[in-house]
Structures are given as C-alpha cells and as structure tokens.
Image: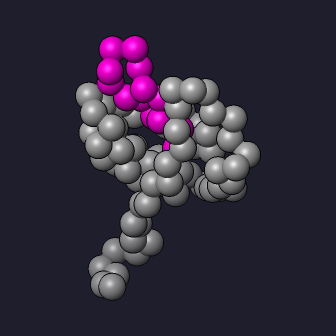
Amino acid sequence: MVVTKQEDGTYAGEFPDLKMCCCKGDSLQDCLDEAQQAAYNWIELELTEDDPQMPHVTDLDDLKLKENQEARNIKVHFRMMEGWDE
C-alpha cells in the first residue's frame, strides 16, 4: 500500500496492485486499519468472481514514491473455507 499524507494532516492509501482499492483516515493508524479491511473486502469480492484473478505483488523497491508518501505492507488473514480452524 502507498500511504500519502494529505495537506490537511489526514492520510490516504491506495493499493497499486488492487484496482480501485483505497482507504483514508484521520491518523496514520486509522488509515492502516481501514487499509486492512479494504484489502480484505477486495480479495473477498474477487474470490466470488467466476474466474478470480489475484494480481502479483509489486516489490516495494519498484514503487516510485513522492516526498509525502511511504510504502507499507498490509497483512490480510483470509479463511478459504467455512469452518476452518487454525
């Protein structure tokens, strides 16, 4: 995820590999929390498609960041089948 600090002090995040998946928050932590849920929802929706296409993950070193941006890895825990226990 690429996090951008906005001029008003809030944060916006976008996932270069997940089309139209984005988030925002009043603080960096709010944005990160929202990002985890947004990524989970994106994956869940993609898996309901007839032919789900999970994108490759862009390497952090390949991202071209602006001065007010930083890259963060977001962990998403997803259960692939109902009733599965860890």
Query: Is residue 3 highlighted in magenta?
Result: yes
- The percent coordinates of residue 46 (x first, y second) are 53, 51
Q: Nearer the viewer, residue 55 or 1?
A: 1
Residue at point 44% right, 72% down? Answer: 80
User: Colour scheme used in the picture?
Assistant: one colour
Residue shown at the point (63%, 44%) measured from the top left: 17
- Whether residue 26 sits left or right of residue 7 in the image: it is left
Horizontal side of 70 relative to 41 (left or right) equals right
| Residue 77 spot, x, y in % from top left | 39, 66
Question: x%, y% of residue 22?
Answer: 46, 34
Q: Residue at x 68, y 41 (%)?
A: 63
Q: Position of residue 26 (x, y in %)?
A: 26, 28
The outermost residue toward the right is 62
How many numbered marks are there? Answer: 0
Task: Please state the extent of the stretch shown in magenta in the rendering.
Answer: 1-14
Residue occupying the point 53% across, 32% down: 69
Please tell me in which quadrant of the rendered image residue 57 appears.
bottom right
Left or right: residue 71 versus residue 32 is right
